[in-house]
Amino acid sequence: MSDGTDTPMKPLDRLRKVHIKTYGCQMNVYDSERMVETLTPLGFEVSADVEGADLVILNTCHIREKASDKVYSELGRLREAQALKAQSGGRMMLAVAGCVAQAEGAEILRRAPYVDMVFGPQTYHRLPAMVAEADKNLGKGQVDTDFPVEDKYDVLPEERLPAGISAFLTIQEGCDKFCTFCVVPYTRGSEQSRAATAILKEARQMVAMGVREITLLGQNVNAYHGEGPDGREWGLARLIRALAEIDGLARIRYTTSHPRDMDDDLIAAHGDVPALMPFLHLPVQSGSDRILAAMNRKHKVDVFRRVVDRLRDVRPDIAFSSDFIVGFPGESDAEFAETLKLVTDVGFAANFSFKYSPRPGTPAADMGNAVPDAVMTERLIMLQQLLDAQQEAFNRSCIGRTMPVLMEKSARDPGQLVGRSPYLQPVHIFADASLIGHIVNCDIQDLKAYSLFGSLVSGDSMPSSSQPFSSQSGKSQTGQSPPVDPKERACA
Ligand code: SAH
Ligand code: SF4
Ligand code: F3S
């Protein structure tokens, strides 16, 4: 493809390196890992930096305006790296994947003609064919954003590569809820649940490679309704119970759930499956019934309150995080005050709040009645102050407690390890690296920023789990280390 600078492009004839930059939600992190797995059999290995790469993939997010804007500025930078590589006789293929690719398709090639491949979340299993095509047809940008008839999971390599101590596993994808502000039903397609047998097999493989904590992923993960090994439809609770039987799998989480899909069985599972962690991300978006209706969230505020109460009844130590949007079209001061009231009443341990961002093609974008940006900023600051204070109070309440911590990797300070509490807080302790991959009891003594600091409970220098683990790095194959920091989880 001509990039307008007439730089010569040569086919690749040696070991190739791929660099993937991942934006957006955890599902993109999982997808990036699966992309690497499609490329490994072709002789690709992961490059930590752009400069050394023969193929650079941006796995993008379209959720808010700022998130998608990042793609074009990053492409501008990559164009320079591509030109520099061409000057020394090399070639750097550029690919745009993920939700911006799905939403914008050929428009990306129009704005950035030096891009070689554009493909969506449902077509990345075709990546090897696209790379082969790019090798043959240099300079011809390809776009593949179909919603294909084949299921990508039938085509993706069965063998997973090592994914660290804590890893993601997609069980459900897409969304049929069509909240009026949201692009996901358009970028990910309709709701699809994977068969439980395939999920259990993948989970067992992951555990055999050292994974101790699995976060089940779906845009509407608790709407999961996959075929079970018994031929019947399984819900999320049934699947969680089966996963909890896997020897060596110590912790199970799931995200993102919708308040409407918290059924009785799932609530009960929180009470009787010890591996299910007592920390739930349950987005509510607003504390106003009128705004929830305008958002097409399909439930009232009281439904959310009831779900929280019922979960607290069965699991008293459960904590919650949520997503909030401020400045949805027409949101009044009084309606925003209802959000503040809900937050005050419920109390959250971590949070994500966003200014409403109109997304092309979504119903809310045509509603008019925009809330002025200055008002949105004011509301966001107020909400974040309240949420930050709750998070700080929650973190501080952990000081003096003993917590089971899953040790994940070495920290920056020599001799120190970092792990995660049941509430995903990073916990730093001085301990031997042999504890990576084990759950140890820690006395929590201090809090700095969002991290807890503590020490091994005396007499607990031996791992509390006898399960041996091979992975020492705590890093996944794409060099990322899920779960992402709570403050980073939000999609840009
Ligand atoms: N499936 C999840 C949310 C996925 S998107 C759910 O139903 O809750 C993650 C978060 O991004 C949303 O919860 C919402 O808070 C935020 N978000 C989505 N679209 C947005 C928009 N147009 N403007 C601002 N925030 C948005
Ligand atoms: Fe988007 Fe979640 Fe609503 Fe689906 S349920 S449309 S993913 S906000
Ligand atoms: Fe897509 Fe996830 Fe962003 S589904 S739009 S990458 S939040």
Image (tube, rainbow, N blue to C red):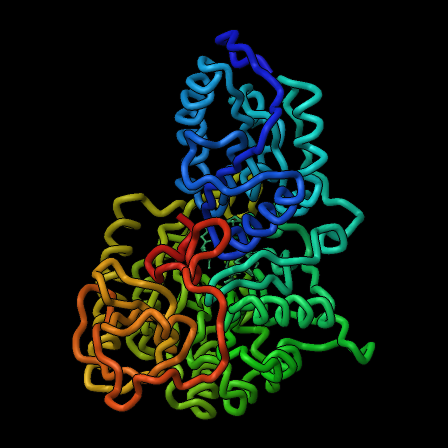
Q: In terms of depth relative to the viewer, which is nearer, 103 or 41? A: 41
Taking 196 as reference, is 47 above or below it?
Answer: above
Which residue is pictured at 42% across the width and 45% down the height? Answer: 357
User: Can residue 294 be seen?
Assistant: no
- The quadrant of the picture occupied by the N terminus is top right
- Which quadrant of the structure image shows residue 331? bottom left
The image position of residue 487, as x and y in percent, is 33, 58
Taking 329 as reference, is 336 above or below it?
Answer: below
Which residue is pictured at 38% across the width and 83% down the height? Answer: 463
- Say left or right for 16 vs 479: right
Which residue is pictured at 24% across the width and 75% down the height? Answer: 395
Question: Which residue lies most toward the top here?
Answer: 6
The image position of residue 433, as x and y in percent, is 33, 69
The image position of residue 7, as x and y in percent, is 51, 10
User: Can residue 78 be seen?
Assistant: yes
Question: Which residue lies most toward the right here?
Answer: 231
- Which quadrant of the structure image shows residue 312? bottom left
Which residue is pictured at 62% across the width and 27% down the height? Answer: 106
Taking 114 as reference, is 248 above or below it?
Answer: below
Q: In terms of depth relative to the viewer, which is nearer, 4 or 109? A: 4
- Say left or right for 331 vs 222: left
Q: In terms of depth relative to the viewer, which is nearer, 462 or 85? A: 462
- Which quadrant of the structure image shows residue 393? bottom left
Q: In terms of depth relative to the viewer, which is nearer, 467 or 103? A: 467
Circle count: 0
The image position of residue 258, as x and y in percent, is 54, 69
